[in-house]
Amino acid sequence: MTRIVVLSAVILGLTPVSAQHTRLFNPTKLAELEGPDREAWQRPDRIMDELAIGERSVVADLGAGGGWFTVHLAARVGPNGRVYAEDIQQEMLQAITRRVQRLRFGNVVTRLGTAVDPRLPKGSLDAALIVDAYNEIEQPVTLLRNLATSMKPNGRIGIVNFKKDGGGPGPPMEERIDPERVVNDASRAGLKLQSRGDFLRYQYLLIFAARPK
């Protein structure tokens, strides 16, 4: 799952993003993100419930990688909703396009962002998700601040990341990020922590208000 991020030197003529950002997940290893047990430990339906994502919602999957969570979102929001699958690696967006075409989802729009700006429509999102990709973000405060401009007044941003003591799949322990660091980054970006989810086996869920009063 890239970033996170996610999303750029993919402008024609420049060095590829993967050569510039050493934190990014290698697109050739996408299969490693989609083990047969991921549905059980990731619990996508519960995460979407916590973010109040439903039929007709407009949502974004930042650092979408190969689109594993993207298609869960697409199924949840239905044909009258919309999912922006954002990444900063063109290879990831190509993989997502193939996936949604194969599954015949017509409600997914891919977006090539940059390392600091997801480049999503302003004021358009009911919810945004950053799943398993926060450790790839090089300037999280700037990215979150730019993401906040794309949220509706009551929009919520969910960040799911691997615990340092959670074991299981995910990046090496030294690359994992404490939740308090994420909360601090979000606060500096002008966001407010709304809730924490402790229902995931290997991860934590933090939900932020996009435009706190």
Image (spheres, rainbow, N blue to C red):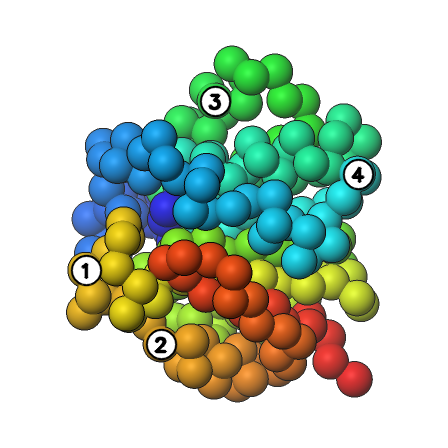
Q: Determine the residue positioned at 37% across, 58% down.
A: 202
The residue that label 4 is drawn on is 55
The residue that label 3 is drawn on is 99
The residue that label 1 is drawn on is 172
Question: Hey, what amino acid is under mark 3?
Answer: Arg
- Between disc 2 and disc 1, whose residue precedes? 1
Of tags 3 and 4, which is closer to the observer?
4
* Residue 41 visible to the viewer: yes
Check the image and report above or below for 158 versus 90: below
How far apart, in angstroms, are the residues tagged by discs 2 and 1?
13 Å
Check the image and report above or below for 36 versus 192: above
| Secondary element type, mark 3 | helix
Question: Hey, what amino acid is under mark 2?
Answer: Asp
Instruction: Tell me residue 37's x, y (percent).
Output: 37, 36
The label number, if any, that marks residue 178 in the structure image? 2
Check the image and report above or below for 66 versus 21: above
